[in-house]
Image (cartoon, grey):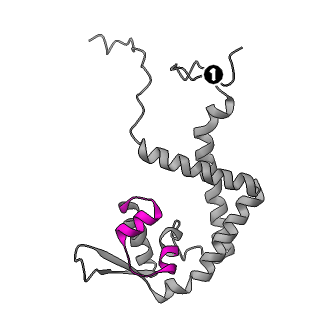
Amino acid sequence: MPARHSKPQPSDPESDTSRSPHLEELPRRILRSWMVWKTALDANYAAEELDGTAPSGAGLVLFALFERDGWTIGELAQRSKVTHVAVLHLIQRLEEALLVKRKQCPQDGRATRVWLTQHGRDLEPKMRALHERNLNTLTRVLGMEDATRLGELLGRLIEGLAVHSEPMPPPTAKPINSARSKR
């Protein structure tokens, strides 16, 4: 019987029986956890009467703007730890919802600054309540210690994937013997 904590060896993932079933399920569990978390988020948005008001992911930008108006898009991207393009798309959706407005920076004509509208500012209490409801959902399901540990692990995953985002080499393909390949 192979040791549980032996050094991983390169192998064919299809035939590796030494890995834990939990490890084998990890990619699917990450995707499934996002799907059920999205369902919980939608329910929490509805409970706070925010569904249709603030786009999904709006907290990344709104909470920064609740603290201080006038961040540049680059500053918001850096603060949120997401790409410039992702923040730009989110800001476009927030503009369409009339929650923020953009203005060209007078000191640097290349930069754009983002400001809350009054409608956006008025959402702060509901967005803070939503954040608390989301945290309560996680701690109710996982407990405080495991929810905290999950946050640490997800932070490591995000950072690691951001640094190592190149695709993994494909598994060695078996040659296909077909009439077409023989031509």
Q: Nearer the viewer, residue 14 or 5?
A: 5
| Type of the residue with mark 1 | Ser
Q: Label 1 neighbourhood size at 10 Å, few (<14), some (14-19), many (20+)?
A: few
Residue 44: image location, x then y, percent: 67, 68
Corner quadrant of residue 127: bottom right
In the picture, measured across the screen, residue 108 lies left or right of residue 1, that is: left
Is residue 116 shown above or below 161?
A: below
Tell me which residue sits at (63%, 35%) in the image.
25
Please, what secondary structure does the residue beneath circle 1 have?
loop
Corner quadrant of residue 163: top left
Q: Nearer the viewer, residue 13 or 150?
A: 150
Tell me which residue sits at (40%, 28%) in the image.
169
Quarter of the figure with the N terminus: top right
Residue 166: image location, x then y, percent: 38, 39
| Residue 155 forms part of the magenta stretch | no
In the picture, measured across the screen, residue 42 lies left or right of residue 163, that is: right
Q: Given the current orientation, which residue lies at the most extreme left position?
A: 109
Residue 120: image location, x then y, percent: 50, 83
Tell me which residue sits at (55%, 52%) in the image.
155
| Residue 69 forms part of the magenta stretch | yes
Corner quadrant of residue 143: bottom right
Q: Nearer the viewer, residue 74 or 15?
A: 74
- Main secondary structure of the magenta stretch: helix
The magenta-colored residue range is 63-84
Residue 5: image location, x then y, percent: 66, 25
In the picture, measured across the screen, residue 36 lies left or right of residue 73, that is: right
Identify residue for label 1: 6
